[in-house]
């Protein structure tokens, strides 16, 4: 019975992931794109699961990997994490800006993105460096709390509506997922 319940929870988690990921389609302003993004994420998820199942069993420990390929992929994710806010601000209507977009707004978005990433990834780095030191752990949590304020504080100057602030956190979540995966590939796999 436990095995069946475990499989049901796994399937439910995958379905929930695909449904939440399909919300990226709202960036385009066309609701039909949610279906396209949902299909894309469903295909990618199934492909990853099939490759993982084919290449490794639960009892195997795979110690060899292509380090160069992981580093290149990590660098690509880092570049994408840096570029996402500028791309979203300039190419979509997810972040509502008043008037025409100018270079100053893009630079401010990138600067705040870099501040967010420095606070968040820096906090993760120092917390992982000395996990037994309570003061460093507290400093890491304070850094994460400060980082989590950056997107909302930014939007209070642009659009104080719930959708405006929510969209900033949605962009921050995308950036954070990309950056943490990049960090894992570049730092932890040395």
Image (cartoon, rainbow, N blue to C red):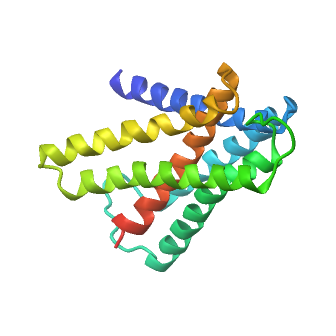
Residue 49 can be seen in this image? no
| Residue at image point 81% right, 43% down | 92
Q: Nearer the viewer, residue 16 or 127?
A: 127
In the image: residue 109, left or right of residue 66: right
Image location of residue 170, percent across then percent down: 61, 35
Tell me: residue 176, above or below residue 156.
below
Number of on-image labels: 0
* Left or right: where 161 falls relative to 114: right
Any part of residue 149 in sight: yes
**What residue is rendered at 59% in x and 56% in y?**
81
Query: Which sits in the foreground, 5 or 24?
Result: 24
The structure residue drawn at horizontal position 54% and vertical position 69%, both measured from the top left corner, is: 75
Image-quadrant location for residue 165: top right
| Image quarter of the C terminus | bottom left
Rendered location of residue 10, percent (x, y): 48, 32
Task: Looking at the picture, tell me which residue is in the foreground, 101 or 50.
Answer: 101
The image shows residue 133, relative to residue 5, as above or below, that is below
Residue 90 screen position, x and y as percent: 79, 50
In this view, the residue in front, 105 or 179, is 105
Q: Residue furthest bottom?
A: 68
User: Residue 73 at x, y = what percent?
Assistant: 55, 68
- Please state if 67 lies on the left or on the right of 60 as rendered: right
**Can you say whether 103 is above or below 33 in the image?**
below
Of the 4 image quadrants, the one containing the N terminus is top left
At x 56% / y 51%, what residue is drawn?
113
Q: Is residue 68 left or right of residue 102?
A: left
Find residue 185 and report its image quarter. bottom left
């Amino acid at each position: 019975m436990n095995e069946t319940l475990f499989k049901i929870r796994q399937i439910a988690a995958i379905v929930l992931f695909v449904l939440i990921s399909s919300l990226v389609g709202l960036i385009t302003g066309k609701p039909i794109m949610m279906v396209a993004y949902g299909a894309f994420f469903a295909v990618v998820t199934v492909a990853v699961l099939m490759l993982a199942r084919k290449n490794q069993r639960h009892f195997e420990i795979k110690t060899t990997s292509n380090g160069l390929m992981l580093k290149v992929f990590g660098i690509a994710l880092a570049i994408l994490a840096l570029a996402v806010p500028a791309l979203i601000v300039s190419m979509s209507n997810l972040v509502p800006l008043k008037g025409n977009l100018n270079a100053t707004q893009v630079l401010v978005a990138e600067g705040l993105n870099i501040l967010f990433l420095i606070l968040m990834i820096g906090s993760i780095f120092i917390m992982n460096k000395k996990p037994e030191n309570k003061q460093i752990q507290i400093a890491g949590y304070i850094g994460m709390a400060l980082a989590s304020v950056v997107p909302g504080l930014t939007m209070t100057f642009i659009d104080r509506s719930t959708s405006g602030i929510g969209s900033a956190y949605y962009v921050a979540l995308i950036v954070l997922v990309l950056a943490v995966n990049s960090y894992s590939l570049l730092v932890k796999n040395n």
